[in-house]
Amino acid sequence: MHHNPKPLRFAIFASGKGSNARVLMQSFSSRFIPADLVCVLSNIAEAGVLQIAREQSYKTALLEHRGKTREQHEKELLALLHEHRVDHILLAGYMRILSPFFLQNWHGNILNIHPALLPDFPGLHAAEKQWESHRTVAGATVHFVDQGVDTGPILLQGSMLTNEGESFEVFMQRLQTEVEHVIYPRAVRLFIDRLATKEV
Ligand code: GRF
């Protein structure tokens, strides 16, 4: 297999507590993901993810969206990505839609994790909807980002059996630790392997 001598450069975008971002950071640090994580970005000053990134000695960036137009905010994001020479973006609970303006030059280079087995339950509150559906199997999806909401091609999915009578809190905790945190690093590795074989 052909190995790219220049490591690929990734950024993580996240808006929340950052548990997926944390396992991704750990996977970059251990080289389970054989690439460089060059920036962890948030649009929310208080987001737990920024604290986690600082603890793990990753470069952080705060670009707030408040008080800016979407295009203005996205121009700042693009400038930051350019400055850090980012090749690929990992969305991990990034709660902003990326517009066609932003996406035009990033096609096939942005991954997202969604807390449901797409195409079922796209959009907001997907984990709650899964839990309320009382299906016997629940899961999460890592997919490429396109212009729709959770509509891009699926890269990897993981599932778990649900337990009858399980509270939403327990369900969500399991969905994250047993599914999301397992599949996201693996999906990124798979993505890198695919890029490598394409380059041969
Ligand atoms: C995850 O459930 C992910 O599927 C969704 O946002 C959540 C982020 O959680 N897109 P965390 O901040 O990584 O804990």
Image (cartoon, helix red, strand yellow):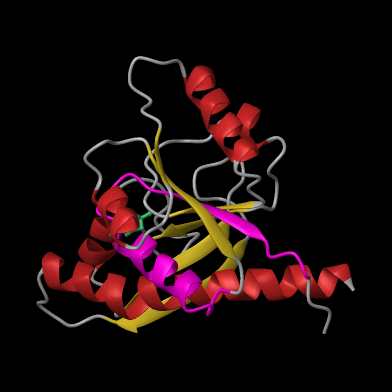
Q: Is residue 108 magenta?
A: no
Q: Which residues are magenta?
A: 5-33
Q: Is residue 24 magenta?
A: yes
The answer to whether residue 139 of the structure is visible from this angle is: no
Q: Foreground: 67 or 112?
A: 67
In which quadrant of the rendered image does the C terminus lie?
bottom right
The answer to whether residue 67 of the structure is visible from this angle is: yes
Vertical side of 41 occupied by 189: above or below:
below
Q: Give left or right: position of 136 versus 92.
A: left
Kindly identify the residue that appears in the image at 51 percent across and 18 percent down.
72
* Place of residue 95 in the rendered image (x, y in percent of width and height, measured from the top left): 37, 41
In which quadrant of the rendered image does the N terminus lie?
bottom right
* Place of residue 85 in the rendered image (x, y in percent of width and height, measured from the top left): 66, 45
Tell which quarter ligand 1 is in: bottom left
* Place of residue 145 in the rendered image (x, y in percent of width and height, measured from the top left): 58, 49
The quadrant in which residue 75 appears is top right
Vertical side of 174 occupied by 94: above or below:
above
Q: Give left or right: position of 115 versus 162.
A: right
* Place of residue 111 in the rendered image (x, y in percent of width and height, measured from the top left): 56, 56
Vertical side of 151 occupied by 26: above or below:
below
Q: Foreground: 53 or 162?
A: 53
Tally of marks: 0
The quadrant in which residue 191 appears is bottom right
Vertical side of 148 occupied by 89: above or below:
below
Q: Give left or right: position of 46 versus 9.
A: left
